């Protein structure tokens, strides 16, 4: 994917001010872009990212999303002076507004029907690690350094859904270790633990993530969205309830034109061309 131009999402009239947004084909790429400080988040970028993912939920032309960072790092998390400093002076009601707003970013990411792929190089810490965690797939490098740093600044590890989601990715004991200690999980270990789906060369991480996103975007996107939704819902279901929910979900997918296209392509010994309907 070589051609990517800044765009405005037409549905929401959305033009980002605090990150870069480009689209190539059916794939949108979000780039956290403060490389001189390792791409930290601010109050404004939290809000704008949540607004973007909310808008993307209704953006029919975008079928997959890549999230990455500029300058060889993913994100160092909340900016120490622009976020953490002001938080120390806030009263409880304002702190709760902030924590709910940061959690909204994760909620909007998980509610997006599009698969979200994180392309992670270098530092991926604090809220940056949460954004990676909230993505559906994660590609990293040998130089990736993931750290859930909340206890290093005197906070609990239960931030933005980490205690609910991280154990689902790496297991309860490993999640507890990361959240209690705040230690760095390096690329090779992150892959072994299942946090990273795979390691790639750092010069290829973004291109490989975009290629994977394009592959998913060319697939049966209605069915992919259903898969994402059921992966999210079934953690709160019994096995029996999940089986029934999947029966309903799959029956809906069987009514799509993509299902028929796949059959006719198979019968003709051709590769199906999916259109997302």
Image (cartoon, helix red, strand yellow):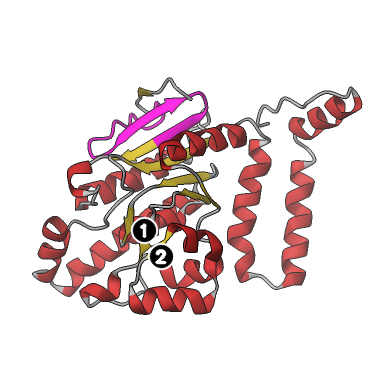
Magenta range is 10-29
Q: Quadrant of the C terminus?
A: top right
At which x and y percent is residue 179?
A: 38, 75
Locate residue 8: give its quadrant.
Answer: top left
* Residue 185's disc number: 2
**What secondary structure predominates along the stretch shown in magenta?**
loop
For the residues bearing labels 2 and 1, Cβ distance under 8 angstroms: yes
Label 2 SS: strand
Which residue is pictured at 44% across the width and 49% down the height?
141
Task: Point out the tag, 2 or 1, that comes first from the N-terminus.
Answer: 1
Instruction: Give above or below for 4 relative to 200.
Output: above
Name the one closer to the observer, 38 or 267.
38
Figure disc tally: 2
Relative side of 235 to 51, left or right: right
Instruction: Give above or below for 107 relative to 115.
Output: below
Q: Crowdedness of circle 1 by 10 Å Cα count: few (<14), some, many (20+)?
A: many
Which residue is pictured at 76% across the width and 27% down the height?
272
> Extreme right residue here?
267
Relative side of 219 to 243, left or right: left
Q: Crowdedness of circle 2 by 10 Å Cα count: few (<14), some, many (20+)?
A: some
Relative side of 206 to 235, left or right: left
At which x and y percent is residue 19?
A: 27, 38
Residue 6 falls inside the magenta stretch: no
**From mark 2 to mark 1, how far is it between C-alphas?**
6 Å
Q: Which residue is mark 1?
A: 145
Label 1 SS: strand
């Amino acid at each position: 994917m070589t051609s990517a131009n800044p765009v405005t999402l037409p549905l929401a009239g959305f033009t980002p001010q605090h990150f870069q947004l480009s689209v190539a084909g059916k794939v949108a790429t979000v780039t956290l872009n403060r490389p001189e400080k390792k791409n930290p988040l601010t109050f404004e970028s939290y809000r704008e990212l949540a607004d973007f993912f909310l808008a993307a939920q209704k953006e029919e032309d975008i079928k997959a999303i890549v999230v990455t960072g500029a300058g060889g790092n993913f994100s160092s998390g909340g900016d120490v002076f622009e976020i953490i400093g002001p938080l120390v002076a806030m009263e409880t009601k304002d702190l709760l507004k902030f924590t709910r707003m940061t959690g909204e970013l994760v909620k909007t990411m998980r509610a997006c029907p599009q698969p979200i792929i994180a392309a992670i190089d270098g530092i991926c810490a604090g809220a940056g690690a949460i954004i990676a965690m909230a993505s559906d797939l994660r590609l990293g490098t040998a130089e990736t350094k993931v750290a859930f740093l909340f206890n290093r600044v005197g906070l609990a590890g239960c931030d933005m859904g980490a205690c609910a989601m991280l154990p689902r990715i790496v297991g309860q004991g490993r999640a507890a270790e990361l959240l209690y200690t705040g230690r760095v999980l390096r690329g090779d270990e992150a892959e072994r633990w299942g946090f990273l789906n795979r390691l790639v060369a750092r010069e290829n991480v973004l291109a490989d993530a975009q290629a994977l996103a394009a592959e998913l975007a060319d697939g049966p996107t209605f069915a992919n969205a259903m898969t994402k939704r059921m992966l999210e819902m079934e953690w709160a279901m019994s096995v029996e309830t999940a089986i029934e929910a999947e029966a309903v979900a799959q029956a809906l997918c069987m009514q799509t034109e993509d299902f028929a296209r796949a059959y006719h392509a198979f019968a003709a010994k051709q590769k199906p061309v999916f259109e997302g309907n």
